[in-house]
Image: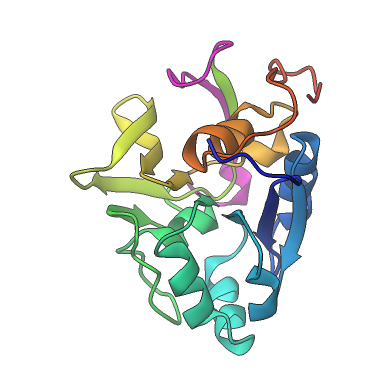
Amino acid sequence: MERLARAARVGVLALQGDFARHQASLEACGADAVRVAWPRDLDGLDALVLPGGESTTMLRLIGANGLREPLERWIGGRPTLGTCAGLILLGRGARGLPAPTFEVLDVEVERNAYGRQIDSFSTAVPVPALEGGPFQAVFIRAPRIRRVGPGVEVLARIGPEAVAVRRGNLLGLCFHPELTPDLRLHRFFLEVVAGLVLPGSAVAAPGTGEGP
């Protein structure tokens, strides 16, 4: 793990979507969470989160704010978490978008494949990489992973379908971990995927809302 003389500095793409809740979860883990809206905001980051939201709007704003090439360079080699729409941006194959996705994670993703807003649901998902039992995952207009490429590790499934995947320092989730008080997946991203050292070692138990 990378030992820092300061708190880990983690960016959250803050163009649209539920970035504020990700920021709160990261701060509860002991990270210095900052909002990313312009290329200069990527400077000095140790990791990055692409939140859920509307992938069409995100891609348009990424282009309008001059973030396309800076994000491509960042995501191409640095620790990145993509949740829901963020997973769509990391993966490939999604249709009806105004610009290409970054295609750094070899998974085929279908947008809104679990249904509309009214079809949102929460379910306990076993994640063997996490201690403490299943993770209560919240799915809101969630994408579906239709294919997992070689070299991509499936971390969690609902039935036969992958809902959490990892390749190296990239982590993609179909659901919204920031909408629960359970910090285990944020800590997993920071400590295991990004290799950062955070204050303390305990994680919040499901439903407790306890931080480090």
Is 209 rendered above or below residue 40? Answer: above
Is 3 on the left-hand or right-hand side of 143? right
Residue under the point 74% across and 18% down: 207
Q: Position of residue 189 (x, y in %)?
A: 55, 38
Q: Position of residue 166 (x, y in %)?
A: 38, 41
As drawn, the residue found furthest toward the left would be 150
The quadrant where residue 72 appears:
bottom left
Is 113 on the left-hand or right-hand side of 204? left
Residue under the point 73% across and 42% down: 26
- Residue 205 can be seen in this image: yes
The magenta span reads 115-133
Is 156 rendered above or below residue 17? Answer: above
As drawn, the residue found furthest toward the top would be 132
Q: Quadrant of the C terminus?
A: top right
Name the residue nearer the viewer: 33 or 62.
33
Name the residue nearer the viewer: 117 or 57.
57
Indicate whether residue 148 is drawn in magenta: no
